[in-house]
Amino acid sequence: MSDSTRHDIEQYGYTQELHRSLSFGDLLVYGLVFMVPIAPFGIFGSVFQGSGGMVALAYVIGMVAMMFTALSYSQMSQAFPMAGSVYTYAGRGIAAPVGFLSGWMILLDYILVPSLLYLIAGIAMNTLVPAVPVWIWIVGFVVLNTAVNYAGIELTAKVNKVMLVAELIVLAIFIVIGIVALAQGKGRGFNWTPVYNADTFSLPLVFGAVSIAVLSFLGFDGISTLAEENRDSSKAIGRSMIAALLLAGVLFIVQTWVAALLVPEPARLIADGDPGGTAFYDAAAVAGGAWLSKLTALATAIAWGFANSLVAQAATSRLLYAMARDRQLPSFLAKVHRTRGVPLNATFLVAVVSLAVGLFFNTRDNGISLLSTLVNFGALTAFLALNVSVVWHYVVRNGSRDWLRHVVSPVIGFAILTYVLFNAQLEAKYLGLVWLALGVGVLSFLLATGRKPELSLADTHGTDQDGDAR
């Protein structure tokens, strides 16, 4: 570890405890695995119904919206190259209490998303092996992922690469067979309706679907939680986020476009929805038969239950570690394993919470839907604070005149996300606001008991106007 790399952390009063072993390639793979290249497999039916069949358009808009937010992450990760994601960036970029509330909101995403992944994977495996109940699959995935994360970030990175290759192979098989099937006259043939259908198009309709589709993109931001394990310059964090988002976005658009043209009964899917979550697998069956349907279902189970939840658990534990290190969560969560260099107690806490929440929502008929809405609301509201932090830190505080990166880009990102949230499901907004109210209550308690959020040696002027860390 170079002296300059060590200074990145120590200038803020922290000790370098996590292992700096991840390259740009590791970060890119981590982000792709977190987003899951085949993520649309599991929520395709919901997005198809919500968009009136324009599922590819929903993913195009979702990618654009997330790209502006990724640019904001890139700027803030250079200003403050440390773990904690939006909690760190909003806290140091605006004010510590804002950082706490931003971290609290994104916790709704980070803590619940592993549970959502385990639940979806457990249900998918149960459809393939009915003799094994869902709850056993959930327990198995949690134990396996916790063991890998406990072994250290280096093993996690190696597993990520293997899983990414496997997912890309399955995706390539589906796309090739799907295109051949369409060329042979199966499905509805090649047309532009997955991108634009004049009969059903409306902005509220499409943006309502985007509020569901963005679930597939959540994860690019998880790269920022590995800032203290990045061995390259601080710019590698932002670059890997943008690269991962672009690659995943293209894959999402192509696969949903092909699948949308192969849906057996599109009108019925729009009218009745996809309660069983099998719409993508049904489209795969039209293209290649039962074997392709089963292959895509199995790939979804493994990708969501192992690969994605593995990196989600790692990211969540780093966020808890960063907040505990600043005394905003119990201090035992800041404990790092001496030799493995992982946030030990935070990793185990995430495992316990994921198991409990996953098992609970498994007992509810609307478990997947409710968890999805909560995850999305938490992430999108935290992203709003992130975009504001760019303007506040660079322009208001440091007098930057880089209008494109520090004003135009974050403002556009903020506007798009606001419109997406406005068109989100009503239940998601209610539950999200309840979580926000709880966060305000916790913050008030901290203030009342003398634990005012104070970031260690918060160097709020730690960047120059070009966004380079001093």
Image (spheres, rainbow, N blue to C red):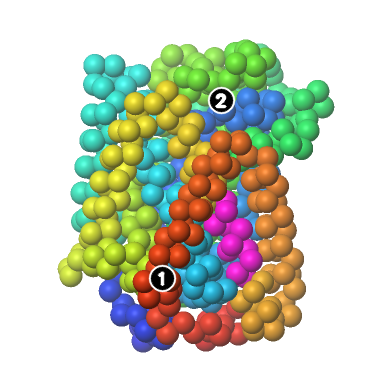
Asked whether, in this view, residue 354 is left or right of residue 468, the answer is left
Residue indicated by mark 2: 45
Which type of secondary structure does the marked residue at label 2 adopt?
A: helix
Residue 459 painted magenta: no
Query: Quick one: quadrant of the N terminus?
Result: bottom left
In the rendered image, the vertical position of residue 140 relative to residue 79, given as above or below: above
Q: Which of 18 and 295 lies nearest the eye of the viewer?
A: 18
Residue indicated by mark 1: 448
Residue 58's spot in the image, x, y percent? 66, 37
Residue 258's spot in the image, x, y percent? 61, 27
- Say what amino acid the circle numbered 1 marks: Ala
Q: Give the residue at x 39% y 61%.
A: 319
Asked whether, in this view, residue 251 is left or right of residue 404, the answer is left
Q: Give the residue at x 82% y 27%.
A: 198
Residue 463's spot in the image, x, y percent? 56, 83
Residue 331's spot in the image, x, y percent? 27, 68
Asked whether, in this view, residue 206 is left or right of residue 212, the answer is right
Residue farthest toward the right in the current orientation of the protein:
198
Residue farthest toward the front in the current orientation of the protein:
448
Q: Give the residue at x 46% y 42%.
A: 36
Residue 386 painted magenta: yes
Range covered by the magenta-colored residues: 380-390
- Say what amino acid the circle numbered 2 marks: Gly
Q: Residues within 10 Å of mark 1 (few under 14, many from 20)?
A: few
Residue 53, by quadrant, is top right
Q: Which of 19 and 255 lies nearest the eye of the viewer?
A: 19
